[in-house]
Amino acid sequence: MHGALLIEKEEIKNVKFVHEEVLTTEEEIKNRKVELERAATIGNAHHGKIKLIFHTEDGLREVETTVWAVTEKFVTLKSELMVPIHAISHVVIY
C-alpha cells in the first residue's frame, strides 16, 4: 500500500525516522491524531491490529501492529516500541 515496504514490528528499532513533519496541512495532522487515538482504543479494548505507514530515511515503511498508547509525540506499540507521530503518513484501521 502506498508503495511502502512491509516490515516486522521488531525491525522498527533499527529504522531511522525522518525528522520533519510528513503531513502538509493542519487538518491532516488533526485527522492523524484522531485515527491514532482510535487505533489505541481498538488495540487496548480488542487487541486489534492496524497498519501504520511511516517515513524513514530509507523510504516509506509499513507495519501491522497493535497500538497501545498515543502521547503528544509518539505512538507506543507492543514490546515498548515507539514511532514518532510526525513520521506517520497513514493509519489504516481494518
Image: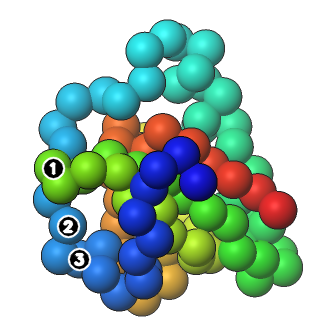
What percent of the width, then of the height, locates residue 16?
Answer: 15, 59
What residue does disc 2 label? 15
Question: Which label's residue is closer to the chain start, 1 or 2?
Answer: 2
Local crowd size for mark 1, using a 10 Å CA cut-off: few (<14), some (14–19), many (≥20):
few
Q: Are marks 1 and 2 in contact (CB under 8 Å)?
A: yes
Give, as a three-letter code, the residue at label 3. Lys
How far is mark 2 from mark 3, CA to CA? 6 Å
Does any portion of residue 73 appear in the rendered image? Answer: no
Q: Secondary structure at mark 1?
A: loop
Give, as a three-letter code, the residue at label 2. Val
The disc placed on residue 68 is none
In the picture provided, is 4 more to the left or to the right than 30? left
Q: Nearer the viewer, residue 9 or 80?
A: 9
Q: Quadrant of the N terminus?
A: bottom right
Give, as a three-letter code, the residue at label 1. Glu
Q: Quadrant of residue 58?
A: bottom left
Q: Are marks 2 and 3 in contact (CB under 8 Å)?
A: yes
The disc placed on residue 13 is 3
Q: Are marks 3 and 1 in contact (CB under 8 Å)?
A: no
**Residue at x 49% of width, y 11% of height:** 25
Q: Nearer the viewer, residue 77 or 17?
A: 17
Q: Quadrant of the C terminus?
A: bottom right
Q: Secondary structure at mark 2?
A: loop
